[in-house]
Image: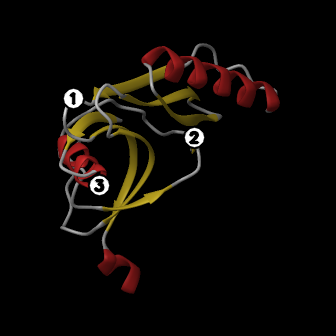
Amino acid sequence: MRTAIGQGRTPISAFDDALHGANVADFNLITLSSVVPPRSDVVISDESLPAEHGDKLYCVVSTARAQLRGESAWAGLGWVYDEELGGLFVEHHSGSQESVEELIDLSLEDMARRRGLDFGPANRVVAGAHCEDRPVCALAIATYEVESWQAARG
């Protein structure tokens, strides 16, 4: 689990800058739905992942971008988890921290209730950026596994 903010001359460049800040810029991101497998560890880290340029990175990702002066971009991931049952992730983005946090909590409460489960209070990470003169991107990413393209070829 990691967060970062980026800035660039274009929204895509700002996104790339945020990926660099999160140490995941040189991967091909493969986004997953929001289910955490049992016996997984949810760890907040900013350490580099061992990999080759272009490897696949399975992840849950939330991004928010702002490109007009005065706009804010907030991205967040929330999760609930039980060692035996597994858990749930949600990803949200909005123009304010309060909004992102509320959306995360409401979504996780609904999702757990729908499954007849009580995971307890939600955990979350959020990142926010404010556009002054260049586009910005806020990023929250949960990484699962790195896979080489060589492994796929067998």
Residue matched to label 3 = 12
Q: How far apart are marks 2 and 1 (CA)?
A: 43 Å
Q: In the image, what residue type sits under mark 1?
A: Glu
The residue positioned 30% from the left and 71% from the top of the image is 148
Q: How crowded is mark 1: few (under 14 residues within 10 Å), some or many (20 or more)?
A: some
Q: How is the image coloured?
A: secondary structure
How many discs mark residues in the rendered view?
3
Return the disc, 3 or 2, that comes first in the chain's sequence.
3
Residue that label 2 marks = 38
Which callout, 2 or 1, points at the residue further toward the start of the chain? 2
CA separation, marks 3 and 1? 17 Å
Q: Which of marks 3 and 1 is in front?
A: 1
Q: Is residue 57 left or right of residue 94?
A: left
Identify residue type, mark 2: Pro
Q: Can you give x and y, in whole percent of width and height, for residue 94 in the image?
A: 49, 29
The residues tagged by marks 3 and 2 sit, at their Cα atoms, a distance apart of 35 Å
Label 1 residue SS: loop
To which residue does mark 1 refer?
132
| Amino acid marked by disc 3 | Ile
Task: Kindly identify the residue that appears in the image at 38 percent across and 41 percent down.
Answer: 141
Is disc 3 placed on a helix, strand or loop?
helix
